[in-house]
Amino acid sequence: MSSVWVLRNGVVRMVENPTTKGQSNSKPGSKVLVFSPSGEVINSYSMLEAKLSFLGWERFIDGDSASLRFHKRSCPDLISLPNDFAKFNSIYMYDIVMKNRNMFHVMDA
């Protein structure tokens, strides 16, 4: 069980973290990437690549087998992801959200 420090009325105390309550079936703090227009949870790179392709992103091949990369011809942005989907975490999810505003969002698993 994790806790957080809360400041109320000038008093600091530790309280149980409300975001981890009742999440026995997933890791505390685990996140998922959601394609906003359809509400679909992205659960594989093939699904993510299809959504990014729909939004104008193309696979960028540069010989680096340690990561998957996507670019858009209309902007200088580059999305770089680990090859293994198991290593796809909230840092990568928020990068996708920032580069595709209103098309993706991140939520608790």
Image (cartoon, helix red, strand yellow):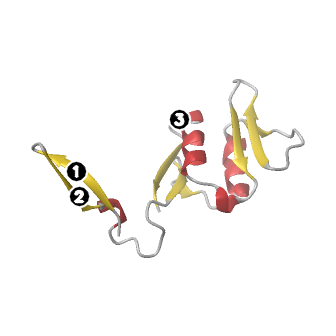
Q: Distance between the residues labelled 3 and 2?
A: 35 Å
Q: Percent from the top left, x then y, of residue 22? A: 34, 72
Given residues 71 and 52, the one toward you in this image is 71
Specify the label residue 14 is tagged with: 2
Q: Percent from the top left, x then y, of residue 64? A: 85, 44
Vertical position of residue 92 compared to residue 18: above or below: above
Residue bearing mark 3: 101
Vertical position of residue 59 compared to residue 25: above or below: above
Residue 69: image quadrant is top right
Residue 42: image quadrant is bottom right
Mark 2 and mark 1 residues within 8 Å of each other at the beta carbon: yes
Q: Which residue is drawn at 76% across and 54% down?
A: 83
Q: Which of marks 2 and 1 is nearer the N terminus?
A: 1
Given residues 68 and 42, the one toward you in this image is 68
Quarter of the image for the N terminus: give it.
bottom left
Return the residue found at the far right: 63
Assign a secondary structure to mark 3. Answer: loop
Specify the label residue 6 is tagged with: 1
Name the kind of residue labelled 3 in the image: Arg
Assign a secondary structure to mark 2. Answer: strand
Q: Percent from the top left, x then y, of residue 49? A: 72, 49
